[in-house]
Image (spheres, helix red, strand yellow):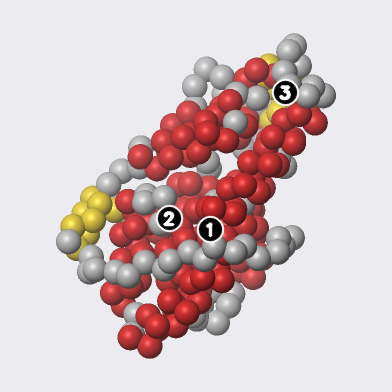
Amino acid sequence: MKIRTIVPLLALMLFSASLPAADVGPKDDAFIVQSRSFLSSHPDLYGRVLGMKSYSKGDYKEAMRQFRKGAYYADKPSQAMVAEMLWKGEGVQIDRAEAYVWIDLAAERLYRDLVAKREQYWSELTELERRQALDKGAALYARYGDSVAKKRIEAILERNRRNITGSRTGYAGTLKIEIPGPGGMPIQVNGDEFYQDKFWQPEDYWKWQNGTWKALPTGTVTASELMPVAPAEAPKKDDE
């Protein structure tokens, strides 16, 4: 079976750490999404960015901690990096069975490169590891699957949008927001730029993220058949 994929996973995550570059344009979206004021209201992306910074420094324990935070709020690249670190034993003991469950979570939205990585993992597992992965799957899906994790970030986006604008309707009006610009020099953006629907409204937010993955370069890889991990219905208690 042929599966479309991209460059190795680490390079993919480095690409993603700078956040959706396809949206850079006259409204300076790139500066908005990388600003602390934006990331503090988007713990999914913030966990990913901090995780990649720690990972690039070789601080794998801190990287894992941050990636798990991003993963808790439905960030698929963060979930993929948890998988990769478990698979390689970076900052943790190698656990290929659990790594498979994490890459299965990361591939939940069927992003082609993550699906290919998931199949690669499955093809390299022993029969014992495959059984262990299936046993571990339900608990991890109950905590980190989209059915529960998306709701967490959606609630935060809605609450922070109302709180920051000071309006129950989330109307930004003539609000001006100062963020770091080119070379670190501060620039001001209008409230309607900072609070674009694609950054704060759930349906538009997920479309924005999905669009980034569709824009990634692709190739092909031959992958074996796999057995996905079925999600559980009952969620666990929240963490962090």
Distance Cα–Cα, label 1 vs label 2: 8 Å
The vertical placement of 153 against 142, above or below, is above
Q: Is residue 4 left or right of residue 58?
A: left
In the rendered image, residue 26, in percent from the top left (x then y), is placed at: 52, 17
The vertical placement of 90 against 141, above or below, is below
Looking at the image, which residue sits at the far top?
Answer: 174
Foreground pick, 102 / 56: 102
Rendered image: mark on residue 208 = none
Q: Which residue is mark 1?
A: 145
Residue contact between numbered discs 1 and 2, judged by CB atoms under 8 Å: yes
Q: In this rendering, does residue 87 appear at all?
A: no
Q: Which residue is mark 3?
A: 170
In the rendered image, residue 155, in percent from the top left (x then y), is placed at: 68, 42
The vertical placement of 104 against 28, above or below, is below
Distance Cα–Cα, label 2 vs label 3: 31 Å
Question: Reading the chain from its start, which is encountered first: label 1 or label 2?
Answer: 2
Q: Is residue 117 left or right of residue 32?
A: left
Q: Secondary structure at mark 3?
A: loop
In the rendered image, residue 216, in percent from the top left (x then y), is placed at: 35, 42
Which quadrant is the N terminus positioned in?
bottom left
Amino acid type, residue under disc 1 in the picture: Gly
Question: Reading the chain from its start, which is encountered first: label 3 or label 1?
Answer: 1
Q: Is residue 173 left or right of residue 153?
A: right
Q: Secondary structure at mark 2?
A: loop
Amino acid type, residue under disc 2 in the picture: Glu
Which quadrant is the C terminus positioned in?
bottom right
Residue contact between numbered discs 3 and 1, judged by CB atoms under 8 Å: no
Residue depicted at 29% across the width and 53% down the height: 5
